[in-house]
Amino acid sequence: MDTPLLTLTVSDELHRAWPGFYGAAVFATVTNTPYNADLWRQIDEYTALYRAKYTTESIKDMPAIQATRQAYKQCGKDPSRYRPSSEALCRRLLRGIPLYQIDTLVDLINLASIYSGHSIGGFDRDKIQGDTLTLGIGRAGEPYEGIGRGPLNIEGMPVYRDALGGIGTPTSDHERTKLTLGTTRLLAIMNGYSGREGLAENMDYLVGLLQDYAAATDLHIVYFN
């Protein structure tokens, strides 16, 4: 494929705080669209099944969500004040609130996040600086602009950094590398704080969504820890 791959690494500080982390990343050439009716039919069908199966209390016991919450605590962040995106999305559905509709890439990543329980970062590959992404822990006063959130305090939060700084946390990705309708080269990272078990199957689900609704080609999957 002609999409340059990034090296994905995990810092020693993150390893010490949460040695069970395992990540899965997919690089792909994609076509984004403002809205996909077939995708939203699938989202609506899954929403009904999800609400029949879980409650806002029972999702706390889901391994992926529980592990991410514990990882936040070990890194120094309160997961109830700064919820990981997967938990926030699940809670939204279970409170009877529909998912917000952004664009096809963001919408399908949100569906995969709810399905898996893992927070998933979605990035425009062309906006990432340098050839390495490293997962570390946010520092006091480290600048970070969350998508639609403005300045975000990422101290004690797991964070991916490129050559210019932080671009992704489980709570919110950064404005600088966000997906847009002009995105043609995608990097999506599924964050397995609960380890590798089930990660491949959940990644297959995400890849299927990308192929079905974003015409994904040149797919390359990487696992790292």
Image (cartoon, rainbow, N blue to C red):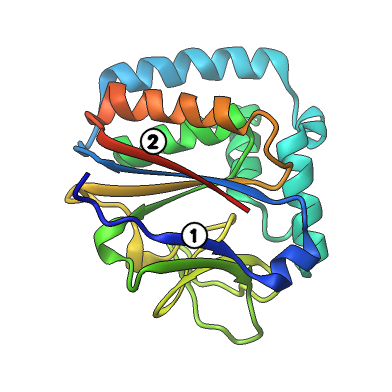
Q: Which mark is residue 8?
A: 1
Amino acid tagged 1:
Leu
Q: Could you say which is closer to the camera, residue 191 or residue 146?
A: 191
Quadrant containing the N terminus in the rendered view: top left
Query: Considering the numbered disc 1 on the image, is that residue within a helix, a strand or a loop?
Result: strand
Tell me if label 1 and label 2 are in contact, CB under 8 Å.
Answer: no
Is residue 78 among what the camera can see?
Answer: no
Left or right: 120 as drawn, with respect to 63: left
Whole-angstrom CA distance, mark 1 to mark 2, is: 24 Å
**Where residue 151 sits: x, y (%)?**
50, 75
Instruction: Locate residue 78, reporting x and y percent.
Output: 77, 62
Q: Amino acid at mark 2?
A: Asp
The total of numbered circles placed on residues is 2
Q: Quadrant of residue 157?
A: bottom right
* Residue projecting furthest to the bottom: 141
For disc 2, the marked residue is 107
